[in-house]
Image (spheres, helix red, strand yellow):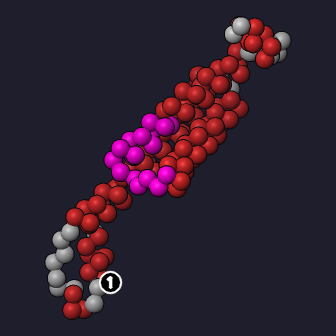
Amino acid sequence: TIVADFKASAPSSLQTMNYASLRFVDYSLELTLQDTVIRGLGITIPVVFLVLLVSSGNWIVASFSVLTIGFIVSTVLGFVFTILGWELGIAESIVSIMIVGLSVDYAIHLGHMFTVAGKDEGIYPREDKFQ
């Protein structure tokens, strides 16, 4: 545990003390949230790949979709944690999993349009639909 590790590295005169602080609770919560986010992403990404593989029937589209999802998640999380300086809290850990859901929705629509569009269709027939 955190306190046992702290006591082990403390001088011998302080190893018999009892430590109590809200910082230990915050630190333990932060470690748990980091573990939960990593485990959640590790479970979600392979499941998303399987769902995309079954729904699209094309492993190339599923692979590129998962790659797109990975880039979206790493860009958004990298931006908010490094540029904005956010710390991982309860809300941020929930949002990090929600980011995967939103990027899956985006990637599914891209993959669907890629598989539905025939060779005769390109960007120009789609532009006519929006005018």
Query: Is 18 left, or right, of 42 in this rendering?
Result: left
- Which residue is disc 1 drawn over? 9
Q: Where is residue 51 in the image (x, y as percent from the top left)?
A: 54, 28
Q: Main secondary structure of the magenta part?
A: helix
**Up/down of 69 relative to 42, above or below:** above
Q: In this view, does 95 lie above or below 24?
A: above
Q: Residue at x 32, y 83 (%)?
A: 9
The quarter of the image holding the N terminus is bottom left
Residue that protrudes farthest toward the bottom in the picture: 13
Residue 46 percent coordinates (x, y): 54, 39
Q: What stretch is highlighted in magenta?
A: 84-100
Could you tell me if residue 70 is visible in this image? no
Using the image as rendered, state which of residue 105 and residue 129 is in the foreground.
129
- Residue 102 position, x and y percent, is 51, 31
Amino acid at circle 1: Ser
Q: Relative to 74, is 37 on the left or the right?
A: left
Crowdedness near tag 1: few (<14), some (14–19) or many (≥20) residues, C-alpha within 10 Å: few
Q: Which residue is drawn at 28% across and 60% down?
A: 26
Of residues 31 and 81, which is closer to you in this image? 81
User: Compared with residue 17, is residue 25 higher up or lower down, i.e. above or below?
Assistant: above
Q: Where is residue 103 in the image (x, y as percent from the top left)?
A: 55, 33
- Residue sitting farthest toward the right: 120
Does 44 sit left or right of 72 as displayed? left
Q: What count of labels does the image hold? A: 1
Q: Residue at x 65, y 25 (%)?
A: 110
